[in-house]
Image: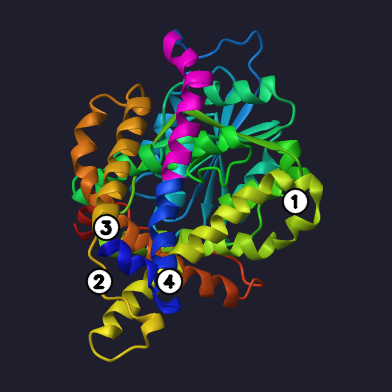
Amino acid sequence: MHLLNLTIETPGSSFIQGIMAFAFYYPLFMAYLWMIGGLYYYFHWEKKDKDSHKPPYFNDYPAVTVVVPCHNEGLHAYETIDGLLDLDYPNYEIIAVNDGSKDDTGKILDDIASKHQKVRVIHLATNQGKAMGLKMATLMSQNEFLVCIDGDAILDKDCITWMIRHFISGPRVGAVTGNPRIRNRSTILGKLQVGEFSSIIGLIKRAQRIYGRIFTVSGVVAAFRKSALHQVGYWSTNMITEDIDISWKLQTNHYEIRYEPNAICWILMPETLKGLFKQRTRWAQGGAEVLLKYADIFSSWRKRRMWMVYIELVTSIIWAYVIVAIFALWLLGNFITLPETLRIRDILPGWNGVILAFTCLIQFAVSLFIDSRYERNISRYYYWMIWYPMLFWMISTVSSVIGFPRAVFRNKKNKAIWTSPDRGLAEKTQNEN
Protein backbone atom coordinates (compact mmCIF):
# COMPACT_ATOMS: atom_id res chain seq x y z
CA MET A 1 0.00 0.00 0.00
CA HIS A 2 2.86 2.34 0.84
CA LEU A 3 4.48 1.69 -2.55
CA LEU A 4 1.17 2.42 -4.26
CA ASN A 5 0.94 5.77 -2.52
CA LEU A 6 4.39 6.66 -3.78
CA THR A 7 3.36 6.09 -7.38
CA ILE A 8 0.36 8.43 -7.26
CA GLU A 9 1.92 11.37 -5.43
CA THR A 10 0.89 14.86 -6.44
CA PRO A 11 3.49 17.40 -7.64
CA GLY A 12 3.09 19.17 -4.32
CA SER A 13 3.96 16.12 -2.27
CA SER A 14 6.94 15.50 -4.57
CA PHE A 15 8.19 19.01 -3.83
CA ILE A 16 7.86 18.49 -0.10
CA GLN A 17 9.54 15.11 -0.33
CA GLY A 18 12.36 16.74 -2.28
CA ILE A 19 13.17 19.30 0.40
CA MET A 20 12.79 16.68 3.12
CA ALA A 21 15.21 14.43 1.25
CA PHE A 22 17.71 17.27 0.92
CA ALA A 23 17.42 18.01 4.65
CA PHE A 24 18.23 14.36 5.37
CA TYR A 25 20.78 13.41 2.72
CA TYR A 26 22.98 16.52 2.86
CA PRO A 27 24.31 16.00 6.43
CA LEU A 28 24.48 12.25 5.79
CA PHE A 29 26.62 12.71 2.67
CA MET A 30 28.89 15.28 4.32
CA ALA A 31 29.42 13.09 7.39
CA TYR A 32 30.78 10.21 5.28
CA LEU A 33 32.80 12.64 3.15
CA TRP A 34 34.50 14.01 6.29
CA MET A 35 35.08 10.54 7.71
CA ILE A 36 36.69 9.22 4.52
CA GLY A 37 38.93 12.28 4.19
CA GLY A 38 39.82 12.29 7.89
CA LEU A 39 40.78 8.61 7.92
CA TYR A 40 42.86 9.01 4.77
CA TYR A 41 44.68 11.95 6.39
CA TYR A 42 45.30 9.90 9.52
CA PHE A 43 46.79 6.89 7.79
CA HIS A 44 48.66 8.92 5.16
CA TRP A 45 50.31 11.51 7.43
CA GLU A 46 49.21 11.53 11.03
CA LYS A 47 49.96 7.94 12.01
CA LYS A 48 53.65 8.43 11.19
CA ASP A 49 53.85 11.20 13.80
CA LYS A 50 51.90 9.06 16.25
CA ASP A 51 54.34 6.21 15.88
CA SER A 52 57.40 8.45 16.35
CA HIS A 53 56.08 10.10 19.57
CA LYS A 54 58.56 12.97 19.10
CA PRO A 55 58.38 16.47 17.62
CA PRO A 56 60.58 17.14 14.57
CA TYR A 57 64.19 18.18 14.94
CA PHE A 58 65.82 20.99 12.90
CA ASN A 59 69.48 21.82 12.41
CA ASP A 60 68.48 25.48 12.42
CA TYR A 61 65.42 26.75 14.31
CA PRO A 62 64.07 29.89 12.59
CA ALA A 63 63.12 32.83 14.78
CA VAL A 64 59.41 33.03 15.61
CA THR A 65 57.23 35.79 17.03
CA VAL A 66 54.28 34.73 19.17
CA VAL A 67 51.53 37.35 18.88
CA VAL A 68 48.92 37.67 21.63
CA PRO A 69 46.19 40.27 20.95
CA CYS A 70 44.35 41.06 24.19
CA HIS A 71 41.16 42.94 25.03
CA ASN A 72 40.06 42.79 28.67
CA GLU A 73 42.12 39.67 29.39
CA GLY A 74 43.12 40.56 32.94
CA LEU A 75 41.89 37.21 34.27
CA HIS A 76 43.99 35.20 31.81
CA ALA A 77 47.04 37.29 30.85
CA TYR A 78 49.43 35.89 33.49
CA GLU A 79 48.44 32.29 32.77
CA THR A 80 48.70 32.67 29.00
CA ILE A 81 52.03 34.54 28.92
CA ASP A 82 53.56 32.30 31.61
CA GLY A 83 52.69 29.32 29.43
CA LEU A 84 54.37 30.96 26.46
CA LEU A 85 57.54 31.65 28.44
CA ASP A 86 57.79 27.92 29.11
CA LEU A 87 57.64 26.75 25.48
CA ASP A 88 60.17 24.18 24.29
CA TYR A 89 61.48 26.21 21.34
CA PRO A 90 64.93 27.83 21.34
CA ASN A 91 64.35 31.00 19.30
CA TYR A 92 61.23 33.07 19.85
CA GLU A 93 59.87 36.34 21.20
CA ILE A 94 56.42 37.36 22.46
CA ILE A 95 54.52 40.48 21.41
CA ALA A 96 51.36 41.15 23.42
CA VAL A 97 48.89 43.75 22.22
CA ASN A 98 46.71 45.59 24.73
CA ASP A 99 43.86 46.68 22.48
CA GLY A 100 42.02 49.39 24.37
CA SER A 101 41.30 47.20 27.41
CA LYS A 102 39.11 48.66 30.14
CA ASP A 103 40.43 46.34 32.86
CA ASP A 104 43.97 45.83 34.21
CA THR A 105 45.26 43.97 31.12
CA GLY A 106 47.72 46.75 30.23
CA LYS A 107 49.26 46.84 33.72
CA ILE A 108 49.59 43.06 33.83
CA LEU A 109 51.31 42.92 30.42
CA ASP A 110 53.71 45.73 31.42
CA ASP A 111 54.52 43.87 34.64
CA ILE A 112 55.34 40.70 32.70
CA ALA A 113 57.43 42.60 30.14
CA SER A 114 59.45 44.29 32.91
CA LYS A 115 60.52 40.85 34.16
CA HIS A 116 61.09 39.01 30.86
CA GLN A 117 63.16 40.28 27.94
CA LYS A 118 61.29 37.99 25.54
CA VAL A 119 58.09 39.96 26.03
CA ARG A 120 57.21 43.23 24.31
CA VAL A 121 53.91 45.09 24.71
CA ILE A 122 51.99 47.29 22.31
CA HIS A 123 49.30 49.56 23.76
CA LEU A 124 46.45 50.78 21.58
CA ALA A 125 44.53 53.65 23.17
CA THR A 126 41.14 52.57 21.84
CA ASN A 127 39.49 49.32 20.79
CA GLN A 128 40.74 48.75 17.23
CA GLY A 129 39.77 45.08 16.83
CA LYS A 130 41.73 41.84 16.70
CA ALA A 131 42.74 42.27 13.06
CA MET A 132 44.41 45.60 13.77
CA GLY A 133 46.17 44.19 16.82
CA LEU A 134 47.55 41.30 14.80
CA LYS A 135 48.68 43.63 12.03
CA MET A 136 50.45 46.04 14.39
CA ALA A 137 52.34 43.22 16.11
CA THR A 138 53.30 41.69 12.75
CA LEU A 139 54.70 44.99 11.52
CA MET A 140 56.75 45.35 14.71
CA SER A 141 58.16 41.85 14.38
CA GLN A 142 61.40 41.31 12.49
CA ASN A 143 60.81 37.57 12.15
CA GLU A 144 59.43 35.78 9.10
CA PHE A 145 57.23 33.38 11.07
CA LEU A 146 54.45 34.23 13.50
CA VAL A 147 52.29 32.15 15.80
CA CYS A 148 49.08 33.98 16.72
CA ILE A 149 46.96 32.94 19.69
CA ASP A 150 44.10 34.36 21.75
CA GLY A 151 44.67 36.03 25.09
CA ASP A 152 43.12 33.16 27.05
CA ALA A 153 44.86 30.28 25.24
CA ILE A 154 47.59 27.99 26.59
CA LEU A 155 50.00 26.46 24.08
CA ASP A 156 51.48 23.00 24.35
CA LYS A 157 55.26 23.16 24.85
CA ASP A 158 56.04 21.70 21.41
CA CYS A 159 53.35 23.60 19.51
CA ILE A 160 55.70 25.96 17.64
CA THR A 161 58.04 23.15 16.57
CA TRP A 162 55.21 21.15 15.02
CA MET A 163 53.90 24.18 13.11
CA ILE A 164 57.24 25.47 11.86
CA ARG A 165 58.09 22.20 10.13
CA HIS A 166 55.45 22.96 7.48
CA PHE A 167 57.03 26.30 6.55
CA ILE A 168 60.45 24.69 6.30
CA SER A 169 59.22 21.86 4.05
CA GLY A 170 56.79 23.94 1.96
CA PRO A 171 57.83 27.30 0.47
CA ARG A 172 54.21 27.99 -0.62
CA VAL A 173 52.78 27.32 2.84
CA GLY A 174 51.28 30.62 3.97
CA ALA A 175 49.64 29.46 7.19
CA VAL A 176 49.30 26.48 9.51
CA THR A 177 46.25 25.94 11.69
CA GLY A 178 46.61 24.23 15.05
CA ASN A 179 44.47 21.88 17.11
CA PRO A 180 42.35 23.67 19.75
CA ARG A 181 41.24 21.60 22.74
CA ILE A 182 38.54 22.58 25.22
CA ARG A 183 39.67 23.01 28.83
CA ASN A 184 36.43 24.13 30.54
CA ARG A 185 34.06 21.16 30.83
CA SER A 186 31.88 21.85 33.84
CA THR A 187 28.58 21.71 31.92
CA ILE A 188 27.02 19.56 29.21
CA LEU A 189 27.80 22.34 26.71
CA GLY A 190 31.48 22.12 27.59
CA LYS A 191 31.47 18.33 27.26
CA LEU A 192 29.67 18.47 23.92
CA GLN A 193 32.22 20.93 22.57
CA VAL A 194 35.03 18.51 23.43
CA GLY A 195 33.47 16.07 21.00
CA GLU A 196 32.60 18.80 18.52
CA PHE A 197 36.17 20.09 18.18
CA SER A 198 37.29 16.52 17.62
CA SER A 199 34.55 15.00 15.47
CA ILE A 200 33.42 18.08 13.58
CA ILE A 201 36.13 20.73 13.44
CA GLY A 202 39.21 18.49 13.60
CA LEU A 203 37.79 15.89 11.22
CA ILE A 204 36.70 18.54 8.71
CA LYS A 205 40.13 20.18 8.70
CA ARG A 206 41.79 16.83 8.06
CA ALA A 207 39.39 16.07 5.22
CA GLN A 208 39.67 19.53 3.68
CA ARG A 209 43.44 19.21 3.73
CA ILE A 210 43.04 16.02 1.67
CA TYR A 211 40.45 17.44 -0.70
CA GLY A 212 42.43 20.60 -1.49
CA ARG A 213 41.65 23.70 0.55
CA ILE A 214 40.84 24.50 4.19
CA PHE A 215 37.87 26.76 4.92
CA THR A 216 39.61 28.59 7.75
CA VAL A 217 42.52 28.52 10.16
CA SER A 218 41.60 28.43 13.84
CA GLY A 219 41.71 32.02 15.01
CA VAL A 220 42.75 30.88 18.47
CA VAL A 221 45.97 29.20 17.23
CA ALA A 222 47.51 29.69 13.80
CA ALA A 223 50.97 30.30 12.37
CA PHE A 224 51.74 32.55 9.39
CA ARG A 225 54.50 33.37 6.95
CA LYS A 226 55.00 37.13 7.20
CA SER A 227 55.95 37.62 3.54
CA ALA A 228 52.70 35.91 2.52
CA LEU A 229 50.70 38.17 4.82
CA HIS A 230 52.44 41.20 3.33
CA GLN A 231 51.60 40.10 -0.20
CA VAL A 232 47.86 39.70 0.52
CA GLY A 233 47.56 42.88 2.60
CA TYR A 234 47.44 41.40 6.11
CA TRP A 235 44.17 40.93 8.01
CA SER A 236 41.08 42.88 6.98
CA THR A 237 39.91 45.18 9.77
CA ASN A 238 36.32 45.31 8.48
CA MET A 239 35.58 41.56 8.49
CA ILE A 240 33.71 40.14 11.48
CA THR A 241 35.87 36.97 11.47
CA GLU A 242 39.40 37.92 10.53
CA ASP A 243 40.58 34.29 10.64
CA ILE A 244 38.20 33.14 7.88
CA ASP A 245 39.03 36.14 5.71
CA ILE A 246 42.82 35.77 5.95
CA SER A 247 42.45 32.07 5.08
CA TRP A 248 40.65 32.96 1.87
CA LYS A 249 43.04 35.81 1.11
CA LEU A 250 46.01 33.48 1.28
CA GLN A 251 44.46 30.59 -0.62
CA THR A 252 42.99 32.70 -3.41
CA ASN A 253 46.53 34.05 -3.84
CA HIS A 254 47.75 30.46 -4.24
CA TYR A 255 49.28 30.00 -0.80
CA GLU A 256 48.73 26.70 0.95
CA ILE A 257 47.22 26.24 4.41
CA ARG A 258 48.01 23.10 6.36
CA TYR A 259 46.49 21.51 9.44
CA GLU A 260 48.80 20.39 12.24
CA PRO A 261 46.97 18.22 14.82
CA ASN A 262 50.08 18.03 17.03
CA ALA A 263 49.97 21.82 17.57
CA ILE A 264 47.82 21.59 20.69
CA CYS A 265 46.28 24.73 22.18
CA TRP A 266 44.02 24.67 25.25
CA ILE A 267 41.16 27.15 25.02
CA LEU A 268 38.08 28.38 26.90
CA MET A 269 34.67 28.18 25.23
CA PRO A 270 31.14 29.37 26.12
CA GLU A 271 29.24 27.23 28.62
CA THR A 272 25.92 29.07 28.43
CA LEU A 273 23.36 28.86 25.64
CA LYS A 274 23.42 32.65 25.27
CA GLY A 275 27.19 32.78 24.93
CA LEU A 276 27.30 29.80 22.59
CA PHE A 277 24.56 31.19 20.35
CA LYS A 278 26.28 34.58 20.17
CA GLN A 279 29.57 32.93 19.20
CA ARG A 280 28.01 30.69 16.52
CA THR A 281 26.03 33.58 15.03
CA ARG A 282 29.27 35.54 14.73
CA TRP A 283 30.93 32.56 13.00
CA ALA A 284 27.98 32.21 10.64
CA GLN A 285 28.03 35.91 9.82
CA GLY A 286 31.76 35.76 9.17
CA GLY A 287 31.32 32.85 6.78
CA ALA A 288 28.56 34.67 4.92
CA GLU A 289 30.72 37.80 4.63
CA VAL A 290 33.41 35.70 2.99
CA LEU A 291 30.87 34.29 0.51
CA LEU A 292 29.90 37.80 -0.54
CA LYS A 293 33.48 39.08 -0.71
CA TYR A 294 34.90 36.17 -2.73
CA ALA A 295 31.96 35.48 -5.05
CA ASP A 296 34.21 36.31 -8.02
CA ILE A 297 36.42 33.23 -7.58
CA PHE A 298 34.40 31.35 -10.23
CA SER A 299 35.66 33.78 -12.87
CA SER A 300 39.24 32.54 -12.38
CA TRP A 301 40.34 29.00 -13.27
CA ARG A 302 43.42 29.47 -11.08
CA LYS A 303 41.15 29.71 -8.04
CA ARG A 304 39.26 26.52 -8.86
CA ARG A 305 40.50 24.68 -5.78
CA MET A 306 38.42 27.06 -3.67
CA TRP A 307 35.24 26.38 -5.65
CA MET A 308 34.21 23.28 -3.70
CA VAL A 309 34.79 25.02 -0.35
CA TYR A 310 32.59 27.88 -1.55
CA ILE A 311 29.86 25.58 -2.87
CA GLU A 312 29.83 23.55 0.35
CA LEU A 313 29.38 26.70 2.44
CA VAL A 314 26.56 27.95 0.20
CA THR A 315 24.88 24.54 0.42
CA SER A 316 25.15 24.51 4.21
CA ILE A 317 23.43 27.91 4.41
CA ILE A 318 20.67 26.73 2.06
CA TRP A 319 20.28 23.61 4.22
CA ALA A 320 19.82 25.79 7.32
CA TYR A 321 17.04 27.79 5.62
CA VAL A 322 15.40 24.57 4.43
CA ILE A 323 15.35 23.18 7.97
CA VAL A 324 13.80 26.37 9.33
CA ALA A 325 11.25 26.36 6.47
CA ILE A 326 10.28 22.75 7.22
CA PHE A 327 9.65 23.52 10.88
CA ALA A 328 7.78 26.73 10.03
CA LEU A 329 5.49 24.99 7.52
CA TRP A 330 4.80 22.14 9.93
CA LEU A 331 3.96 24.61 12.70
CA LEU A 332 1.70 26.70 10.46
CA GLY A 333 -0.06 23.56 9.26
CA ASN A 334 -1.24 22.94 12.80
CA PHE A 335 -3.11 26.24 12.88
CA ILE A 336 -4.19 26.98 9.32
CA THR A 337 -4.96 24.98 6.21
CA LEU A 338 -2.00 25.17 3.85
CA PRO A 339 -2.00 24.29 0.15
CA GLU A 340 -1.09 20.66 -0.48
CA THR A 341 2.17 21.82 -2.11
CA LEU A 342 3.31 23.25 1.24
CA ARG A 343 1.78 20.80 3.69
CA ILE A 344 4.11 18.88 6.01
CA ARG A 345 2.21 16.37 8.11
CA ASP A 346 4.96 15.09 10.40
CA ILE A 347 8.52 16.04 11.35
CA LEU A 348 9.17 13.25 13.81
CA PRO A 349 12.21 11.25 12.68
CA GLY A 350 11.56 7.78 11.32
CA TRP A 351 14.01 5.30 9.87
CA ASN A 352 15.93 8.15 8.24
CA GLY A 353 16.42 9.80 11.64
CA VAL A 354 17.79 6.54 13.03
CA ILE A 355 20.26 6.29 10.14
CA LEU A 356 21.38 9.89 10.63
CA ALA A 357 21.83 9.43 14.39
CA PHE A 358 23.75 6.19 13.82
CA THR A 359 25.98 7.97 11.28
CA CYS A 360 26.68 10.73 13.80
CA LEU A 361 27.77 8.17 16.36
CA ILE A 362 30.05 6.52 13.80
CA GLN A 363 31.57 9.92 12.98
CA PHE A 364 32.15 10.67 16.65
CA ALA A 365 33.73 7.23 17.14
CA VAL A 366 36.08 7.72 14.17
CA SER A 367 37.17 11.17 15.27
CA LEU A 368 37.65 10.22 18.92
CA PHE A 369 39.76 7.27 17.79
CA ILE A 370 41.96 9.61 15.75
CA ASP A 371 42.18 12.22 18.52
CA SER A 372 42.80 9.76 21.36
CA ARG A 373 46.52 10.41 21.02
CA TYR A 374 46.15 14.10 21.88
CA GLU A 375 43.95 13.73 24.92
CA ARG A 376 43.78 10.89 27.39
CA ASN A 377 40.41 9.32 28.19
CA ILE A 378 38.67 11.42 25.54
CA SER A 379 36.44 8.43 24.81
CA ARG A 380 34.48 9.13 28.01
CA TYR A 381 32.83 12.06 26.21
CA TYR A 382 31.49 9.78 23.50
CA TYR A 383 28.22 9.06 25.27
CA TRP A 384 27.47 12.76 25.69
CA MET A 385 27.51 13.19 21.91
CA ILE A 386 24.05 11.65 21.48
CA TRP A 387 22.76 15.12 22.42
CA TYR A 388 24.90 16.91 19.85
CA PRO A 389 22.59 16.76 16.80
CA MET A 390 19.57 17.84 18.85
CA LEU A 391 21.24 20.84 20.48
CA PHE A 392 24.10 22.04 18.27
CA TRP A 393 22.37 21.49 14.93
CA MET A 394 19.50 23.66 16.15
CA ILE A 395 21.88 26.38 17.30
CA SER A 396 23.93 26.21 14.09
CA THR A 397 20.82 26.27 11.94
CA VAL A 398 19.30 29.32 13.59
CA SER A 399 22.64 31.14 13.72
CA SER A 400 23.16 30.55 9.98
CA VAL A 401 19.71 31.92 9.19
CA ILE A 402 20.40 35.01 11.30
CA GLY A 403 24.04 35.44 10.29
CA PHE A 404 23.48 35.64 6.53
CA PRO A 405 21.26 38.76 6.48
CA ARG A 406 23.56 40.36 9.04
CA ALA A 407 26.44 39.85 6.63
CA VAL A 408 24.43 41.28 3.73
CA PHE A 409 23.34 44.44 5.51
CA ARG A 410 26.37 45.13 7.71
CA ASN A 411 28.25 48.28 6.81
CA LYS A 412 31.66 46.98 5.69
CA LYS A 413 33.20 50.44 6.16
CA ASN A 414 33.06 49.97 9.94
CA LYS A 415 35.87 48.21 11.79
CA ALA A 416 35.12 44.88 13.45
CA ILE A 417 36.06 45.69 17.03
CA TRP A 418 36.37 43.46 20.08
CA THR A 419 33.51 42.26 22.25
CA SER A 420 34.31 40.23 25.36
CA PRO A 421 33.18 36.62 24.77
CA ASP A 422 31.70 34.07 27.15
CA ARG A 423 34.61 32.01 28.54
CA GLY A 424 32.61 29.61 30.68
CA LEU A 425 31.13 29.46 34.16
CA ALA A 426 34.48 29.67 35.96
CA GLU A 427 35.20 33.11 34.51
CA LYS A 428 31.66 34.25 35.23
CA THR A 429 32.09 33.30 38.89
CA GLN A 430 35.42 35.17 39.09
CA ASN A 431 33.86 38.29 37.62
CA GLU A 432 30.97 38.15 40.05
CA ASN A 433 33.36 37.84 42.97
Residue 35 within the magenta-colored segment of the rendering: yes
Q: Which mark is residue 346?
A: 2
Q: Earlier in the sequence, mark 3 or mark 1?
A: 1
Instruction: Give amino acid for label 2.
Output: Asp
Residue named by callout 4: 14
- Where, quadrant-wise, is the C terminus in this rendering? bottom left
Q: Secondary structure at mark 2?
A: loop
Nearest the eye: 145 or 293: 293
Q: Which mark is residue 391?
A: 3
Instruction: Give amino acid for label 3.
Output: Leu
Residue 382, image x and y in percent? 23, 36
Residue named by callout 1: 233
Q: Nearer the viewer, mark 3 or mark 1?
A: 3
Instruction: Give amino acid for label 1.
Output: Gly
Q: Earlier in the sequence, mark 2 or mark 4?
A: 4
Q: Mark 1 to mark 2: distance in Å?
A: 51 Å
Which is the main secondary structure of the residues drawn in magenta?
A: helix
Which image quadrant for residue 142? top right
Q: Against 97, is 14 above or below?
A: below
Residue 188, image x and y in percent? 19, 49
Nearest the eye: 175 or 346: 346
Instruction: Give amino acid for label 4.
Output: Ser
Please report the residue visible at 58 percent of the width from the left and 78 percent of the height from the top.
409
* In this rendering, position of residue 291 left or right of residue 425: right
Q: Which residues are magenta?
A: 30-51
Residue 336, image x and y in percent? 27, 91
Q: Earlier in the sequence, mark 3 or mark 2?
A: 2
Please report the residue visible at 27 percent of the width from the left and 63 percent of the height from the top.
2
Q: Mark 3 to mark 2: distance in Å?
A: 20 Å
* In this rendering, position of residue 390 left or right of residue 78: left
Q: Earlier in the sequence, mark 1 or mark 2?
A: 1
